[in-house]
Each structure stands twice: as C-alpha cells, then as structure tokens.
Image: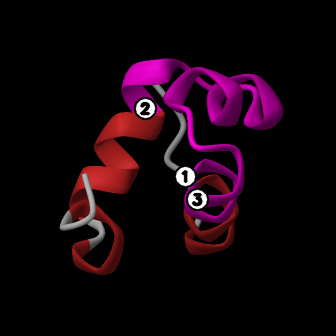
C-alpha cells in the first residue's frame, strides 16, 4: 500500500514544479515519481490551467 502525500508535501511539489518548470526535476527534488508530480499539479486548479 502506497503512502499518501500530506497537504504540505503537495504544496512543496507544486512550488518546486512552478520554480523548476519540469515534472522530472520536481520529482527528483521531492523523491517521488514524475507521474505523482503530474497528478498533483493537474489536480491543482491554480497551476493546471497554465499547462
């Protein structure tokens, strides 16, 4: 069973994605997969419209 991300972790992933501009870079910075970063970013309405 996979661990769930906390709200704090999700906010950091989104902030790193915005700063770094890359799913891969944000994934490495947070120790998660590229798909996890993409899912978190796409679920956030304030960021996903920019994609």
Judged by depth in the image, the label closer to the viewer, 1 or 3, is: 3
Q: Tell me where residue 15 appears, x and y as whole percent.
A: 65, 65
Q: Do the numbered discs 1 and 2 sit on residues whose CB atoms are within 8 Å? A: yes
Label 1 or label 2, whichever comes before in sequence order: 1
Instruction: Using the numbered discs, state the Cα–Cα distance from disc 1 to disc 3 in whole angstroms.
Output: 18 Å
Label 2 or label 3, whichever comes before in sequence order: 3
Q: Which mark identifies residue 14?
A: none
Residue shown at 35% from the left, 69% from the top: 47
> Within 10 angstroms of label 1, few (less than 14), some, or many (20 or more) residues?
few
The quadrant where residue 20 appears = top right
Whether the magenta-drawn stretch holds residue 40 is answered as: no
Numbered label tally? 3
The quadrant where residue 39 appears = top left
Residue shown at 54% from the left, 19% from the top: 33
Asked whether residue 1 is in view, the answer is: no
Q: Which residue is mark 2?
A: 36
The part of the chain drawn in magenta is 14-36
> Within 10 angstroms of label 2, few (less than 14), some, or many (20 or more) residues?
some
Asked whether residue 41 is in view, the answer is: yes
Q: Which residue is mark 1?
A: 5
Q: Do the numbered discs 2 and 3 sit on residues whose CB atoms are within 8 Å? A: no
> Within 10 angstroms of label 3, few (less than 14), some, or many (20 or more) residues?
some
Q: Tell me where residue 50 appears, x and y as whole percent.
A: 27, 63
Instruction: Using the numbered discs, state the Cα–Cα distance from disc 1 to disc 2 in whole angstroms.
Output: 10 Å
Q: Which residue is mark 3?
A: 18
Q: Secondary structure at mark 2?
A: helix
Label 1 or label 3, whichever comes before in sequence order: 1
Q: Is residue 45 above or below residue 24?
A: below
Q: Tell me where residue 44 appears, x and y as whole percent.
A: 30, 69
Q: Is residue 48 above or below residue 51?
A: below
Which of the pair 14/31 is nearer the observer? 14
């Amino acid at each position: 069973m996979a661990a769930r991300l906390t709200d704090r972790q999700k906010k950091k992933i989104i902030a790193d994605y915005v700063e770094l501009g890359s799913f891969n870079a944000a994934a490495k910075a947070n120790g998660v997969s590229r798909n996890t970063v993409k899912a978190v970013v796409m679920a956030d309405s304030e960021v996903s419209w920019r994609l």
